[in-house]
Amino acid sequence: MSIIKAAVVQAAPVLFDTPRTLGKLTALTRDAAGQGANLVVFPEAFVGGYPKGLDFGARLGTRSPEGREDFRRYFESAIDLPGPEASRMGDIARDNGVHLVVGIIERDGGTLYCSTLTYAPSGKLLYKHRKLMPTALERLVWGFGDGSTIGVVETPIGKIGSVICWENYMPLLRAAMYAQGVELYCAPTVDDRDAWLPTMRTIALEGRCFVISACQYFTRGDGPADYAPFQGNHPSTVLIRGGSCIVDPLGNVLVEPDFTGETIKIAEIDRRIIVRGKYDLDVAGHYARPDIFRLSVDTRPKTAVAFDKAPLPVSDTIDQSQQQEGSPCSA
């Protein structure tokens, strides 16, 4: 499929209310699909939220009870994988016949991760990416991803990959994505600065790929009454102002940033432009210098505890113990 339509959804979740957020995701995906989108990209932390302006009660050497309560509420807004919320997102992709990329807050044990999920139109989860490098205070509430989720998935509409927010400023991560042949480079974000668009244009030119970046448009009113960001308490206070964009492999801006409110923007994508761009710049091929530069990527998952072999079931362990002791039950 050479020509497709990609949509960036610029919207906010209902902070600390995951069921209502999923309802909003359902409606927005349906709207984008109704406009002909084959690929629908949501912002960073859309499911689970990005509570901009909270400090979680942290000062050097101290954490407050109020901050711990903020984290508890944030933790409960996150989702498990696998889990019912992830299954529902698959249903949303299937019901609308789209490839769907969604930024989520993932709960794994006692740790949260900022992740993206990529779904096929069948509803199958194709790939998960965990943000490698949380920025600043994000490191207090999110864990670090590892190399096992740096990937690109091949689909009928092109090779899709995700890089989240300031990960896009990691040159070696970008190089790993280019080397995997990413064509539809999704960049979910909450970075609403004017500098974001030139960053996305640089990546599109550098990687000769389409860059599809969705950013939240988030106001104080999208949070509950007891949400207290430092920016102010008026419901209309804008905390994240949007700026979603789509850029082609030659650096042309197909969707200009919009800072006026929630919106869905769609662009036609002609994948043939990718090869036209590779003609004179392929940074993972003829424009590389492997005789001088070489990147090694460790894609092994990293766990805090590794078991050499699976432990025996409790019943088997008891049986073995009884046999060793000569118990009558061992017969």
Image (spheres, rainbow, N blue to C red):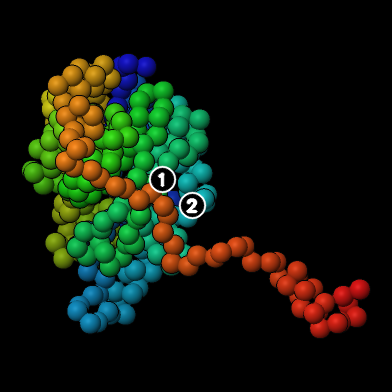
Residue 107, visible in the rendered structure: yes
- Give the quadrant of residue 102: top left
Q: Which residue is mark 2?
A: 81
Characterize the local packing of mark 2: few (<14), some (14-19) or many (20 or more) Cα atoms within 10 angstroms.
Answer: few
Instruction: Please tell me in which quadrant of the rendered image residue 70 appears.
Output: bottom left
Q: Position of residue 25 (x, y in %)?
A: 38, 41
Which secondary structure lies at badge 2?
Answer: loop
- Foreground pick, 162 / 311: 311
Residue drawn at x 37%, y 23% as measured from the top left: 157
Locate the N terminus and report the quarter of the image it occupies.
top left
Left or right of residue 13, residue 310 in this image: right
Whole-percent x, y for residue 141 in the image = 31, 65
How many numbered marks appear?
Answer: 2
- In this view, the residue in front, 220 or 277, is 277
Q: 234 or 167, which lies in front?
A: 167
In the picture, the quarter occupied by the C terminus is: bottom right
Q: Secondary structure at mark 1?
A: strand
Q: Give the residue at mark 1.
A: 128
How many angstroms separate mark 2 from mark 1 (CA)?
A: 10 Å
Q: Amino acid at mark 1?
A: Lys
Tell me: residue 108, above or below residue 174: below
Q: Is residue 10 above or below residue 83?
A: above
Say left or right for 287 vs 326. left
Q: Quadrant of residue 105?
A: bottom left
Is the residue under label 1 in contact with that under label 2 (CB below 8 Å)? yes
